Amino acid sequence: METDNRKNENKEERKSSIFAAIVRDSIARMTADRLIGPKLQSGEIRKNLVEPQWKCPSCFHLTKVDLSNCQAELLSLAQNPNPDRVILQLHGGGYIGSMRNAYRSFAGLYNELGKGINVFTPDYRVAPEHPYPAALEDALEAYEWLLRFGAQPEKIVIAGDSAGGGLALALCLYLKDHGMQLPEGLVLMSPWTDLTASGESYETNFTKDPLFGNTRESMIYNLDYVGKEDPKNPYISPLFGTYAGFPPMLIQVGSIEMLLSDSTSLAKKAKEAGVKVRLSIYEEMFHVFQMGELMLPESRQAWEEVGKFLRVLDRRRQETFSQQEEEDMYE
């Protein structure tokens, strides 16, 4: 019976790899197109994307909040909302793309995985019109807004993908440097932590990355957000920050991303500083593959891992357990 189970698991893994390969090939074909490719890789398409108005499912309630320089959205359950915990979601987009409908869907997933957890998503200002420190200022105000309206730092999780993941780290570095209480945990999907593009995977995965590969003109080389600042500023490239005292992190990244080393180097540095880090490298996966949500098997697995991470944070608040016991919670 055990052998049969292993065979079934292997079959499922092969199915997942085939499905993922189809998506990877589709992305690679688009980026190779002489007309669409450069606009996709540079972020021009992402920046100028026009989407239909998002229809909020009846099970949720969406509240729009005006911050000083941007608008934010609070997604909560329409019935019996859970005001006890909240996720501050910082969207990706290379610091040049604003919020899109995918992040409203992400908010719904976070809500479900967190058993009704509220999700607060600021549509922070982006470059080139608003270079650094605009995004950080807006993220900080969003965090302070949550505190002002009763959220406790030890029950706030900050989540972000790509630039949003880097911004989540930059925000925590700022909070630490200014004596403010840090959040309960961090969920980081393919975080962009090194805007100097100096990591080894920028070379080793140059021909493998289906989205950013084979060009130096992609958005990961775009310095519009950096402006006249030093790209090694930890509030811009958080990889160069110090992590002692940081909350637990879940870091997810694809093995063929040019930004792979942004995650692996971050994980190494944070672990050396005594931070609890769960680094998950998804084989043959591309940048922010979690956009596949529940349709792509690898993406579904990643979101399930996010749910488990949130449950581990819940238990950590209530009890002490060993590293092995924590690992068992992810099984």
Image (tube, helix red, strand yellow):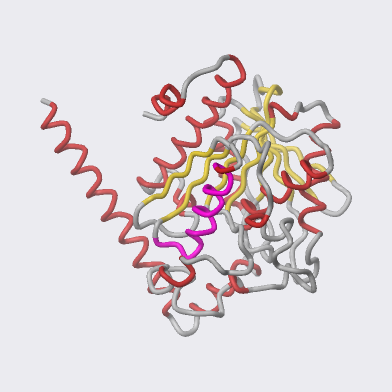
Residue 204 drawn at (x, y percent): 41, 69
Figure quadrant of the N terminus = top left
Q: Nearer the viewer, residue 118 or 254?
A: 254
The spot of residue 168 in percent (x, y) is: 67, 47
Which of the 4 quarters of the picture holds residue 207?
A: bottom left
Q: In the rendering, at what x and y percent does residue 75 appear?
A: 67, 36
* Residue 28 on the magenta segment: no
Residue found farthest to the bottom: 34
Name the dominant secondary structure of the magenta segment: helix
Viewport quadrant of the C terminus: top left
Instruction: Residue lying at the far front in this picture: please name it.
Output: 272
Farthest residue in the right direction?
68
- Choose between 77 and 157: the one closer to the eye: 157
Residue in the image at 39% along x and 25% along y: 328
Which of the 4 image quadrants contains residue 128? bottom right
Q: Is residue 67 left or right of residue 305?
A: right
Is-magenta flag for residue 264?
A: yes
Instruction: Establish if 275 lies above or below 217.
Output: above
Q: Over which residues does the magenta segment extend? A: 256-271
Asked whether, in this view, residue 180 is left or right of residue 48, the answer is right
Residue at the image position 80 percent from the left and 66 percent from the top:
130
**x and y percent of residue 138 in the render?**
80, 51
Between 285 and 117, the one nearer to me in the picture: 285
- In the image, is residue 55 above or below residue 233? above
Q: Which residue is at the front of the view, 99 or 263?
A: 263
- Residue at 77% x, 53% y: name it: 136
